[in-house]
Image (cartoon, rainbow, N blue to C red):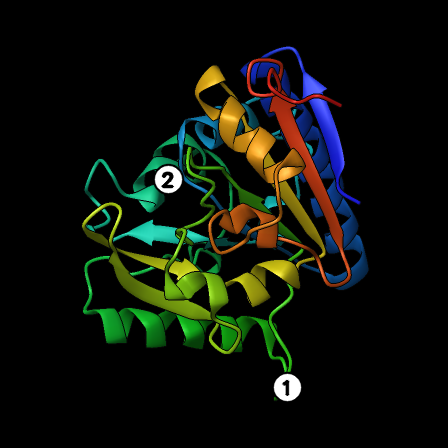
Amino acid sequence: MPEIVVLPDLNQVAQEAARRWVEIAQGAAAERGSFSVALSGGSTPRTLYEMLAGEPWRSQAPWESTHVFWGDERRVPSSDPQSNYRMARETLLDHVPIPSGQIYRMLGEDLLSSAISDYEDKLWRYFRFGRGEWPRFDLILLGLGPEGHTASIFPGTRAVSDQSNMVLAYQVPQLGVERITLTLPVINHAHHIIFLVAGQKKASALAMVLEGERRPSACPAQAVQPVDGTLTWLVDQAAASELTR
Protein backbone atom coordinates (compact mmCIF):
# COMPACT_ATOMS: atom_id res chain seq x y z
CA MET A 1 0.00 0.00 0.00
CA PRO A 2 1.26 3.50 -0.77
CA GLU A 3 2.02 5.96 1.97
CA ILE A 4 -0.17 9.07 1.68
CA VAL A 5 1.03 12.13 3.57
CA VAL A 6 -1.21 15.21 3.61
CA LEU A 7 0.57 18.46 4.51
CA PRO A 8 -0.78 21.99 4.96
CA ASP A 9 0.62 23.62 1.82
CA LEU A 10 3.14 23.44 -1.03
CA ASN A 11 5.94 24.72 1.16
CA GLN A 12 5.46 21.87 3.62
CA VAL A 13 5.22 19.34 0.79
CA ALA A 14 8.55 20.55 -0.54
CA GLN A 15 10.12 20.53 2.93
CA GLU A 16 9.10 16.91 3.52
CA ALA A 17 10.29 15.93 0.04
CA ALA A 18 13.66 17.58 0.72
CA ARG A 19 13.99 15.71 4.01
CA ARG A 20 13.24 12.39 2.33
CA TRP A 21 15.57 13.17 -0.61
CA VAL A 22 18.47 13.77 1.78
CA GLU A 23 17.66 10.68 3.85
CA ILE A 24 17.46 8.43 0.79
CA ALA A 25 20.57 9.99 -0.76
CA GLN A 26 22.63 9.58 2.38
CA GLY A 27 21.55 5.94 2.72
CA ALA A 28 22.28 5.10 -0.92
CA ALA A 29 25.68 6.82 -0.86
CA ALA A 30 26.65 5.00 2.32
CA GLU A 31 25.45 1.61 1.05
CA ARG A 32 26.39 1.72 -2.64
CA GLY A 33 28.67 4.72 -3.02
CA SER A 34 26.26 6.66 -5.23
CA PHE A 35 22.73 8.06 -5.32
CA SER A 36 20.64 8.04 -8.50
CA VAL A 37 17.58 10.24 -8.91
CA ALA A 38 15.19 10.93 -11.79
CA LEU A 39 13.76 14.45 -11.68
CA SER A 40 10.33 15.70 -12.60
CA GLY A 41 9.31 19.00 -14.12
CA GLY A 42 6.54 21.29 -12.91
CA SER A 43 5.88 23.95 -10.30
CA THR A 44 5.86 21.65 -7.26
CA PRO A 45 9.31 20.14 -7.95
CA ARG A 46 10.60 23.66 -8.64
CA THR A 47 9.87 24.58 -5.02
CA LEU A 48 11.64 21.40 -3.87
CA TYR A 49 14.72 22.11 -5.98
CA GLU A 50 14.95 25.66 -4.68
CA MET A 51 14.86 24.34 -1.13
CA LEU A 52 17.52 21.71 -1.79
CA ALA A 53 19.79 24.43 -3.19
CA GLY A 54 19.63 26.29 0.14
CA GLU A 55 20.30 25.46 3.75
CA PRO A 56 19.91 23.30 5.69
CA TRP A 57 19.53 20.72 2.92
CA ARG A 58 22.39 21.81 0.68
CA SER A 59 25.04 20.96 3.25
CA GLN A 60 23.42 17.64 4.18
CA ALA A 61 23.04 15.99 0.77
CA PRO A 62 25.91 13.93 -0.72
CA TRP A 63 26.12 15.91 -3.97
CA GLU A 64 29.47 14.48 -5.05
CA SER A 65 27.87 11.02 -5.07
CA THR A 66 24.63 12.15 -6.77
CA HIS A 67 23.75 11.13 -10.33
CA VAL A 68 20.88 13.08 -11.89
CA PHE A 69 18.53 11.79 -14.59
CA TRP A 70 15.10 12.94 -15.80
CA GLY A 71 11.79 11.10 -15.87
CA ASP A 72 10.65 12.94 -18.97
CA GLU A 73 11.42 15.91 -21.17
CA ARG A 74 9.72 18.19 -23.63
CA ARG A 75 10.90 18.17 -27.25
CA VAL A 76 12.68 21.51 -26.93
CA PRO A 77 16.32 22.66 -26.73
CA SER A 78 17.91 22.81 -23.29
CA SER A 79 17.78 26.61 -23.41
CA ASP A 80 14.00 26.71 -23.92
CA PRO A 81 11.90 28.01 -20.97
CA GLN A 82 9.77 24.82 -21.23
CA SER A 83 12.78 22.53 -20.77
CA ASN A 84 12.66 20.38 -17.62
CA TYR A 85 16.46 20.30 -17.71
CA ARG A 86 16.69 24.10 -17.79
CA MET A 87 14.32 24.44 -14.84
CA ALA A 88 16.31 21.95 -12.74
CA ARG A 89 19.60 23.55 -13.73
CA GLU A 90 18.50 27.07 -12.83
CA THR A 91 16.86 26.12 -9.53
CA LEU A 92 19.18 23.36 -8.28
CA LEU A 93 22.03 22.06 -10.40
CA ASP A 94 23.82 25.41 -10.80
CA HIS A 95 23.87 25.81 -7.02
CA VAL A 96 25.16 22.45 -5.74
CA PRO A 97 28.49 20.66 -6.32
CA ILE A 98 27.35 17.77 -8.52
CA PRO A 99 30.11 16.85 -11.00
CA SER A 100 28.99 17.74 -14.53
CA GLY A 101 29.65 14.20 -15.73
CA GLN A 102 26.99 12.95 -13.31
CA ILE A 103 24.16 14.92 -14.93
CA TYR A 104 22.42 12.95 -17.69
CA ARG A 105 19.94 15.10 -19.54
CA MET A 106 17.45 13.92 -22.14
CA LEU A 107 18.29 15.42 -25.54
CA GLY A 108 15.01 17.10 -26.34
CA GLU A 109 16.44 18.83 -29.42
CA ASP A 110 17.51 15.57 -31.12
CA LEU A 111 15.60 13.36 -33.52
CA LEU A 112 13.28 10.98 -31.69
CA SER A 113 15.27 7.85 -32.51
CA SER A 114 18.62 9.31 -31.48
CA ALA A 115 17.15 10.81 -28.29
CA ILE A 116 15.87 7.37 -27.29
CA SER A 117 19.11 5.54 -28.05
CA ASP A 118 21.18 8.21 -26.30
CA TYR A 119 19.20 7.94 -23.08
CA GLU A 120 19.07 4.16 -23.14
CA ASP A 121 22.85 4.18 -23.50
CA LYS A 122 23.17 6.49 -20.50
CA LEU A 123 21.02 4.11 -18.45
CA TRP A 124 23.04 1.07 -19.54
CA ARG A 125 26.36 2.73 -18.77
CA TYR A 126 25.38 3.94 -15.32
CA PHE A 127 23.30 1.06 -13.98
CA ARG A 128 25.16 -1.80 -15.71
CA PHE A 129 22.23 -4.20 -15.44
CA GLY A 130 21.98 -7.56 -17.16
CA ARG A 131 19.66 -8.92 -19.81
CA GLY A 132 16.10 -9.19 -18.59
CA GLU A 133 16.80 -6.66 -15.84
CA TRP A 134 15.81 -3.02 -15.45
CA PRO A 135 17.68 0.02 -14.19
CA ARG A 136 16.93 0.63 -10.52
CA PHE A 137 16.88 4.24 -9.42
CA ASP A 138 17.27 5.10 -5.77
CA LEU A 139 14.59 7.77 -6.13
CA ILE A 140 12.14 8.82 -8.85
CA LEU A 141 10.13 12.00 -8.44
CA LEU A 142 6.77 12.18 -10.18
CA GLY A 143 4.02 14.73 -10.68
CA LEU A 144 0.35 14.25 -11.52
CA GLY A 145 -1.46 15.77 -14.48
CA PRO A 146 -5.11 16.87 -14.31
CA GLU A 147 -6.19 13.87 -16.39
CA GLY A 148 -4.09 11.39 -14.43
CA HIS A 149 -0.89 11.29 -16.48
CA THR A 150 2.53 11.08 -14.86
CA ALA A 151 5.97 11.67 -16.36
CA SER A 152 4.96 11.83 -20.05
CA ILE A 153 2.79 8.73 -19.87
CA PHE A 154 -0.59 9.94 -21.09
CA PRO A 155 -3.99 8.21 -21.11
CA GLY A 156 -4.75 6.03 -24.11
CA THR A 157 -1.19 6.09 -25.48
CA ARG A 158 1.23 3.25 -26.09
CA ALA A 159 3.31 4.54 -23.17
CA VAL A 160 0.70 3.13 -20.77
CA SER A 161 1.04 -0.44 -22.00
CA ASP A 162 4.72 -0.55 -23.00
CA GLN A 163 6.49 -3.26 -21.02
CA SER A 164 9.58 -3.77 -23.16
CA ASN A 165 11.30 -0.40 -23.63
CA MET A 166 13.13 1.77 -21.11
CA VAL A 167 12.58 5.04 -22.95
CA LEU A 168 9.84 6.18 -25.32
CA ALA A 169 9.52 9.28 -27.47
CA TYR A 170 6.20 9.88 -29.17
CA GLN A 171 3.57 12.37 -30.25
CA VAL A 172 1.17 13.02 -27.37
CA PRO A 173 -2.27 13.39 -28.99
CA GLN A 174 -3.73 15.35 -26.06
CA LEU A 175 -1.05 18.03 -26.44
CA GLY A 176 -0.10 17.82 -30.11
CA VAL A 177 3.57 17.79 -29.12
CA GLU A 178 6.34 15.22 -28.80
CA ARG A 179 7.65 14.05 -25.43
CA ILE A 180 10.36 11.67 -24.29
CA THR A 181 9.79 9.62 -21.13
CA LEU A 182 10.99 6.79 -18.97
CA THR A 183 8.55 3.89 -19.14
CA LEU A 184 6.47 2.35 -16.37
CA PRO A 185 8.73 -0.70 -15.91
CA VAL A 186 11.68 1.61 -15.20
CA ILE A 187 9.62 3.70 -12.80
CA ASN A 188 8.22 0.67 -11.01
CA HIS A 189 11.66 -0.85 -10.39
CA ALA A 190 12.88 2.14 -8.36
CA HIS A 191 13.79 1.76 -4.70
CA HIS A 192 11.67 4.82 -3.85
CA ILE A 193 8.97 6.68 -5.80
CA ILE A 194 7.61 9.97 -4.52
CA PHE A 195 4.64 11.79 -6.06
CA LEU A 196 4.50 15.53 -5.37
CA VAL A 197 0.99 16.95 -5.76
CA ALA A 198 -0.19 20.41 -4.74
CA GLY A 199 -3.09 22.72 -5.51
CA GLN A 200 -6.85 22.56 -5.89
CA LYS A 201 -6.52 21.94 -9.63
CA LYS A 202 -5.07 18.50 -8.86
CA ALA A 203 -7.80 17.44 -6.41
CA SER A 204 -10.02 15.59 -8.89
CA ALA A 205 -7.07 13.79 -10.46
CA LEU A 206 -5.71 12.74 -7.08
CA ALA A 207 -9.08 11.38 -5.99
CA MET A 208 -9.38 9.51 -9.29
CA VAL A 209 -5.96 7.89 -8.88
CA LEU A 210 -6.27 6.94 -5.22
CA GLU A 211 -9.98 6.22 -4.82
CA GLY A 212 -11.44 5.83 -8.29
CA GLU A 213 -12.08 2.72 -10.33
CA ARG A 214 -8.81 1.13 -11.37
CA ARG A 215 -8.34 1.95 -15.06
CA PRO A 216 -4.63 2.55 -15.74
CA SER A 217 -5.21 3.01 -19.47
CA ALA A 218 -7.37 6.04 -18.65
CA CYS A 219 -5.43 7.07 -15.54
CA PRO A 220 -1.75 6.14 -16.01
CA ALA A 221 -0.65 7.21 -12.53
CA GLN A 222 -2.60 4.21 -11.20
CA ALA A 223 -0.08 1.98 -12.99
CA VAL A 224 2.75 3.22 -10.78
CA GLN A 225 3.12 0.24 -8.45
CA PRO A 226 6.63 -0.55 -7.22
CA VAL A 227 7.92 -4.07 -7.84
CA ASP A 228 10.10 -4.01 -4.74
CA GLY A 229 10.21 -0.48 -3.40
CA THR A 230 8.23 2.24 -1.65
CA LEU A 231 5.56 4.53 -3.07
CA THR A 232 4.80 7.79 -1.28
CA TRP A 233 2.32 10.52 -2.08
CA LEU A 234 3.22 13.91 -0.60
CA VAL A 235 0.17 16.13 -1.14
CA ASP A 236 -1.11 19.40 0.22
CA GLN A 237 -4.54 19.91 1.75
CA ALA A 238 -5.91 21.59 -1.38
CA ALA A 239 -4.98 18.61 -3.56
CA ALA A 240 -6.38 16.21 -0.96
CA SER A 241 -9.69 18.06 -0.64
CA GLU A 242 -11.70 15.51 -2.64
CA LEU A 243 -10.34 12.42 -0.89
CA THR A 244 -12.91 10.68 1.26
CA ARG A 245 -10.61 8.58 3.45
Q: Which of the pair 38/159 is nearer the observer?
A: 159
Give the percent coordinates (x, y) of residue 149. Answer: 45, 45
Q: Residue at x 46, y 50 (%)?
A: 218
Residue at image location 50% in from the left, 71% down from the top: 123
Compared with 159, 222 (above or below) is: above
Mark 1 vs mark 2: in front:
1
Horizontal relation, residue 217 to residue 82: left or right: right
Q: Which residue is mark 1?
A: 130
Q: Residue at x 48, y 25 (%)?
A: 202
Give the quarter of the image for residue 103.
bottom left
Identify the element where label 2 is drawn.
Answer: helix
- Neighbourhood count class around disc 1 (C-alpha, 10 Å): few under 14, some 14–19, many 20 upward: few
Q: Residues within 10 Å of mark 2 (few under 14, many from 20)?
A: some
For marks 1 and 2 on the same chain, the one whose residue lies earlier in the sequence: 2
**Residue type at the position of mark 2:** Arg
**Quadrant for the N terminus in the image:** top right
Image spot of residue 17 (x, y percent): 64, 30
Farthest residue, direction bottom = 131
Name the residue tied to disc 2.
89
Residue at horizontal 59 percent and vertical 29 percent from the top: 207
Image quarter where the C terminus lies is: top right
Question: What residue type is disc 1 on?
Answer: Gly
The residue at the far front in this view is: 213
- Labels in figure, total: 2
